[in-house]
Image (cartoon, rainbow, N blue to C red):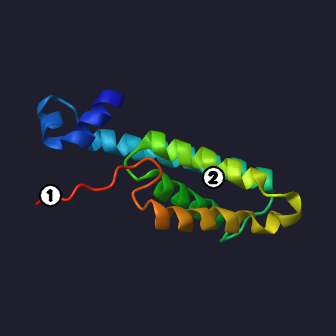
Amino acid sequence: MGKGLQAVAENPAAATLLGVDGDRLIQVTFFISSALAAVAGTLVAWSVGITGPQFGMIFGLKGLAVIVLGGLGSLPETRLAGFLLGLVEAMVPAAASGFRDAVAFAILFLVLLVRPQGLLGQPPVEKV
């Protein structure tokens, strides 16, 4: 499934010509990712013990911060950004635990000011 999914992502028409059922593969991928998200949400809700309509908002915002820090198209950079953000949040003293979320977004703001292409991204090349 991995190579077929990569082929559909790269060139759906060519993947179809090679016999890959792109529509079915996309449906299966959405089903699996939705099931994994549901399991992850349930486990986090059990560990925190609080649920409600705004329950996952901070997790989504931190995920967005990690994606922006690492760059949208680079998995290794996104992993590095998630690790670094988690490490910095863990270093926030217990007395200032209310500022833990603020620290994450302050880092996001600073990185966007200094390196808008991401942590390891290359600056865009201007073509003339």
Residue at image x 29%, y 35%?
A: 6
Disc marking residue 88: none
Left or right relative to 124: residue 33 = right
> Disc 2 and disc 1: Cα gap in Å?
34 Å
Instruction: State whether residue 128 appears in this view.
Output: yes
**Mark 2 Cα within 10 Å, few/some/many (few <14, many 20+)?**
many
Residue at image x 78%, y 57%?
A: 92
Image location of residue 73, percent across then percent down: 37, 48
Residue at image x 26%, y 44%?
A: 23
Name which quarter of the figure residue 99 lies in: bottom right
Instruction: State whether residue 55 appears in this view.
Output: no
Residue at image x 14%, y 29%?
A: 18
Q: Secondary structure at mark 1?
A: loop
Q: Is residue 6 above or below residue 102?
A: above
Left or right relative to 109: residue 25 = left
Q: Amino acid at mark 1?
A: Lys
Q: Secondary structure at mark 2?
A: helix
Q: Is residue 28 above or below residue 57?
A: above
Name which quarter of the figure residue 10 lies in: top left
Image location of residue 91, percent across then percent down: 77, 52
Q: Amino acid at mark 2?
A: Leu
Disc marking residue 85: 2
Q: Identify the residue under disc 1.
A: 127
Q: Quadrant of the N terminus?
A: top left
Image location of residue 20, percent across then percent down: 21, 32
Residue found at the very far bottom of the displayed protein: 53
The mark that comes first in sequence, 2 or 1, is 2
Question: In the depicted view, which residue is nearer to us: 56 or 17?
Answer: 56
Number of marks: 2
Question: In the depicted view, which residue is nearer to us: 73 or 51?
Answer: 73
Which numbered mark, 2 or 1, is in the foreground of this view?
1
